[in-house]
Amino acid sequence: GWNCKRVLDHGAARVHGIDIAESMLNQAKENFDDPRLTFDLQDIHEPMEGSYDLIIGRAVLHHVDYQQVLRQLYDNNLNPGGKMFFIEPMAEGLLTKLYWKLSPHLHTPDERPFYATDIRWLEQSFPGFELIPFGYLSFPVAIASALVMPQPSNIFTRMADRIDQKLARLRWLGPRFHTGIFCITKPAS
């Protein structure tokens, strides 16, 4: 429910949070008592009720049949002029490859990060698609600087962030970043 609360704090009139885990929904309901928030048990593969101006997900798509889910949300739930944002792990960076290979015990069997071929499918399927990658240098620099610097925001991580912003302009490099924000805009009419 934390992300739902953040969206409210940024001006949403109402927020509808869904999850497949009843325990997570119960926790959200306990932590957030706001009439503008509703929470429901929902398998994202199943058709959903309602239409929305904004659909947000964090680390959701790499657990599901993302093509089916995105197509369904776009066609059936996203209002004209609406936007979808999903924050997902990318697959093709060296450190990311090592992370996935060396830590299989940290992943569920259904997890699969996004490859360049997945990004091409998104671009072809949704004309309003944009990838905003992050964590190319800042991901390894944050790990290294944590060993010697007491603050996560330090001169090294700030410099890495600035360089990442410049590197993100190179479209071919996008899938090699650690993480990507998938932005899909539906035309207004």
Image (cartoon, rainbow, N blue to C red):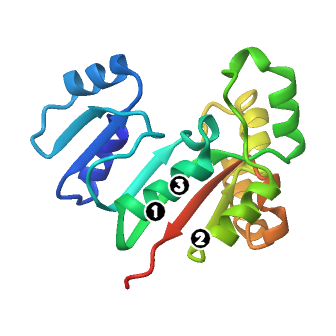
Residue contact between numbered discs 2 and 1, judged by CB atoms under 8 Å? yes
User: Who's the residue at 38% across and 82% down the image?
Assistant: 188
Please indicate whether residue 70 sits to the left or right of residue 54 in the image. right
Spatial separation of the CA atoms under disc 3 and disc 2: 10 Å
The N terminus sits in image quarter: top left
As measured in the structure, the alpha-carbon distance from the residue carrying label 2 to the one carrying label 1 is 9 Å
Q: Which residue is mark 3?
A: 70
Pinpoint residue 50: horizontal percent, then vertical percent: 26, 54
Residue type at mark 3 is: Leu
Do residues under tags 3 and 2 come within 8 Å of each other at their CB atoms?
yes
**Which residue is the site of mark 1?**
74
Q: Are marks 3 and 1 in contact (CB under 8 Å)?
A: yes
Q: Secondary structure at mark 3?
A: helix
Seen at 90% across and 42% down, the residue is 94
The image's mark for residue 126 is: 2
Residue at 63 percent across and 30 percent down: it is 150
